[in-house]
Image: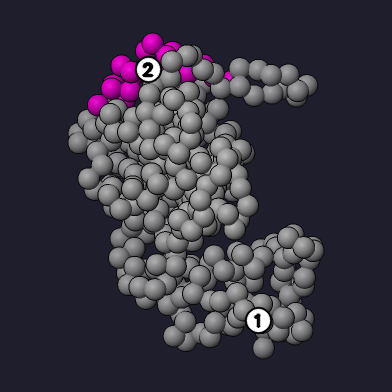
């Protein structure tokens, strides 16, 4: 049976690449107060964009989705949820909002996790919200021939309550007395939570909510302004690959959690870099016009850029201004339109004049 212990950092997590990620994240955390001196209205826009992205991405990872307009309406409490998917989306919205607003008062205990899961399922007709799983579950996949195979067997239902008590106790012990960076403890806890898989449904979404909660409790406020869940969705294949690689031998403590920890640290660092880009883009608004800031995005991004991506990066710029700027860039030959309909995007024409 797996033993939870975060007091001593495994040697594998003392590697140069892990240490480098931790140092860069720590530097970003030190600069976040400066980034948060941006105009209040801009920060509020980033908050709204991040919430919509987080709710949508975390649910889409689990196959739960609705249209973008309805997603925005549900997250911003302007649309009543209809159907199972939208009810589950509304539950995630509520728990995420609670975490952003009250994280300093929400201690991570087994009872707290049950309450958060209850709220996650509150809008649905499911009776298992706020209860540990009552049947054993397994992580399944498909082999090259399309046959269903068992990838991992989590903690049994009967052992789950005690395992969750032990897991939360180990978290507190590790944060209070551990010899390593608290981020390593958080990543280890989230990984072990996924391996226990304590609920009949909602384990993936709960793991991401707990990630945000623990990061914000440690002072990593980037989660409120940039969607960690969206970054995980963008790298979903790598996420599942790291989780599978790290879980081999977990039950008898033979596993190496390094791939999962490395992945999560990379996500946190990417969130900070995204936050810096967005805030610095806005801060540069005193020197750069809104049209120039839209054009700058094509210098920073490779591949196709959509109107929605531009608006998410620069939420203070209206869609009318974005469309007008794109039309000007097209007429100047600086960008090229690709795709059609909802798949419409724009790519930079490298080598074109930037005058």
Q: Are marks 2 and 1 in contact (CB under 8 Å)?
A: no
Which mark is first along the chain, 1 or 2?
Answer: 2
Q: Which residue is the site of mark 2?
A: 160
Whether residue 185 is visible, yes or no, is yes
Q: Position of residue 108 (x, y in %)?
A: 28, 35
Q: Which residue is the site of mark 1?
A: 325
Q: Position of residue 80 (x, y in %)?
A: 51, 51
Q: Residues in magenta?
A: 151-169
Q: Where, by quadrant of the figure, is residue 323 drawn?
A: bottom right
User: Any magenta on residue 165?
Assistant: yes
Q: Is residue 178 above or below residue 336?
A: above
Give 306 or 96, whichever is nearer the viewer.
96
Give 104 or 80, whichever is nearer the viewer.
80
Q: For the point 44% across and 35% down, which residue is it?
A: 121
Q: Where, by quadrant of the figure, is residue 300 drawn?
A: bottom right
Q: For the point 34% across and 29% down, which residue is it?
A: 114
Q: How many marks?
A: 2
For the C terminus, which image quadrant?
bottom right
Q: Position of residue 57 (x, y in %)?
A: 55, 47
Whether residue 9 is visible, yes or no, is no
């Amino acid at each position: 049976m797996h033993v939870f212990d975060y007091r001593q950092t495994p040697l594998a997590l003392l590697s140069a690449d892990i240490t480098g990620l931790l140092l860069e994240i720590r530097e970003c955390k030190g600069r976040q107060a400066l980034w948060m001196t941006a105009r209040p209205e801009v920060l509020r826009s980033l908050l709204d964009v991040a919430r919509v992205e987080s709710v949508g991405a975390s649910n889409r990872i689990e196959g739960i989705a609705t249209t973008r307009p309805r997603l925005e309406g549900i997250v911003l409490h302007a649309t009543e949820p209809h159907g199972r998917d939208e009810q589950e989306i509304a539950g995630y919205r509520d728990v995420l909002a609670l975490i952003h607003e009250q994280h300093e008062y929400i201690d991570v205990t087994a009872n707290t996790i049950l309450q958060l899961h209850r709220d996650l399922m509150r809008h649905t007709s499911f009776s298992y919200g706020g209860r540990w799983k009552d049947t054993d579950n397994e992580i399944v996949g498909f082999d090259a021939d399309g046959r269903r195979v068992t990838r991992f067997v989590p903690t049994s239902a009967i052992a789950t309550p005690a395992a969750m008590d032990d897991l939360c106790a180990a978290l507190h012990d590790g944060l209070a007395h551990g010899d390593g960076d608290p981020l390593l403890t958080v990543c280890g806890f989230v990984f072990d939570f996924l391996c226990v898989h304590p609920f009949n449904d909602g384990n993936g979404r709960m793991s991401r909510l707990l990630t945000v909660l623990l990061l914000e409790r440690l002072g990593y406020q980037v989660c409120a302004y940039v969607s960690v869940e969206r970054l995980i969705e963008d790298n979903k294949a790598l996420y599942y690959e790291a989780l599978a690689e790290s879980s081999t031998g977990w039950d008898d403590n033979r596993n190496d959690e390094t791939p999962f920890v490395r992945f999560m640290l990379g996500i946190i660092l990417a969130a900070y870099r995204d936050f810096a880009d967005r805030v610095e883009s806005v801060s540069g608004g005193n020197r750069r016009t809104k049209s120039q800031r839209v054009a700058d995005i094509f210098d920073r991004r490779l591949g196709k850029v959509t109107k929605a991506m531009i608006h998410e990066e620069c939420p203070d710029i209206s869609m009318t201004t974005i469309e007008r700027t794109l039309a000007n860039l097209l007429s100047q030959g600086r960008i090229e339109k690709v795709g059609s309909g909802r798949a419409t995007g724009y790519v930079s024409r490298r080598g074109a004049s930037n005058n």
